[in-house]
Amino acid sequence: MKLTLNVWRQTGPTAPGKMVRYEMPDVNPDMSFLEMLDVLNEGLIQKGDSPIVFEHDCREGICGSCGFMIDGKAHGGFPKTTVCQLHMRHYKDGDELFLEPWRATAFPIVKDLMVNRSAFDRIIQAGGFISVPTGSAVDGNAIAIPKSNSDRAMDAAQCIGCGACVASCPNASASLFTGAKIAHLNLLPQGQPEKLDRALHMVTTMNEEMFGSCTNLRECEATCPKGISIENIAIMNRHFVEASFAHRPTASEAGAG
């Protein structure tokens, strides 16, 4: 099959970028999208041109490394599908596609289709972990956890941090990512001792990283390759409000200030 690709090319974070057109005359329908780009890059290298930079690792929809906009849709817009899981048979002979990097202030472009998502790492560092000693390992059945809580926690834990939620949100909000990381731990017994501090620190860091606010448009949920529910945003907001009240100064402390 023949495809025409319009790819965003940008040599660095501060360099000007532009769309560059490439003709792909012989695309195998069974290729993944990234394999198709590999073939394109092989041809560019053979001609002495710079290959297209894009991020990837496992290519199995697990690591969350890959991701860019295809025709204005995160990961191509197919339900619960990352770019590495997207196959060319979803497209028709003669299609013209437009490839762009995630667009968000908090995700500065590194080069071409690759962006810097270290803002997500800093949100995790702010509280996405268990630091309270829990002693030696015990039998899994010894800790009673309501099935509804365990199901919700494991659903939230599926988040791979790809950034599609931010890229698809008109406000570039990271609420779905942050909410999933908070809910994953806060719904389980091991996460209870630090529940409020976790919510307060992670949401504060998210805001400091210049992500936008959530206005419940649900674009994040629609484009998430793991189907993360916006229920996790509600959990995050509830725990953040609880934490804000728990950490507000008393009347005597406020007067002393």
Image: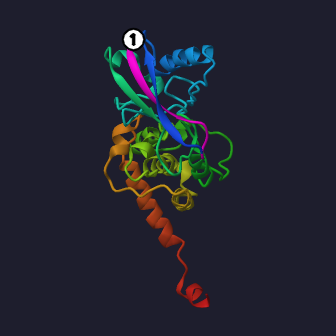
Residue 161 visible within the image: no
29 relative position to 177: left or right:
left
Amino acid residing under circle 1: Pro
Q: In terms of image quadrants, where is residue 92?
A: top left
Residue 17 position, x and y percent, is 52, 39
**Which residue occupies 41% across, 49% down?**
232
Residue where numbered disc 1 is placed: 29
Q: Residues within 10 Å of mark 1 (few under 14, many from 20)?
A: some
Residue 198 higher or lower than 142, as above or below: below
The picture places residue 38, in percent across and down from the top left corner, at: 54, 18
Q: Is residue 253 left or right of residue 211?
A: right
Q: Return the residue nearer the eye: 31 or 141.
A: 31
Magenta residues (range): 1-14
Q: How is the image coloured?
A: rainbow
Can residue 229 be found in the magenta stretch? no
Residue 98: x percent and y percent?
40, 30
Image quadrant for the C terminus? Answer: bottom right
Q: Is residue 181 above or below residue 44?
A: below
Up-down: is 129 above or below 99? below
Residue at the farthest bottom position: 255
* Residue 28 visible within the image: yes
* Image mark count: 1
Nearest to the observer: residue 149 or residue 49: 49
Q: Where does residue 195 sit, x and y in percent of width and height? A: 53, 57
Q: Identify the residue shown where x is 48% and y is 39%.
A: 159
Residue in front for this viewpoint, 45 or 147: 45
Judge whether 43 appears above or below 182 on screen.
above
Q: Secondary structure at mark 1?
A: loop
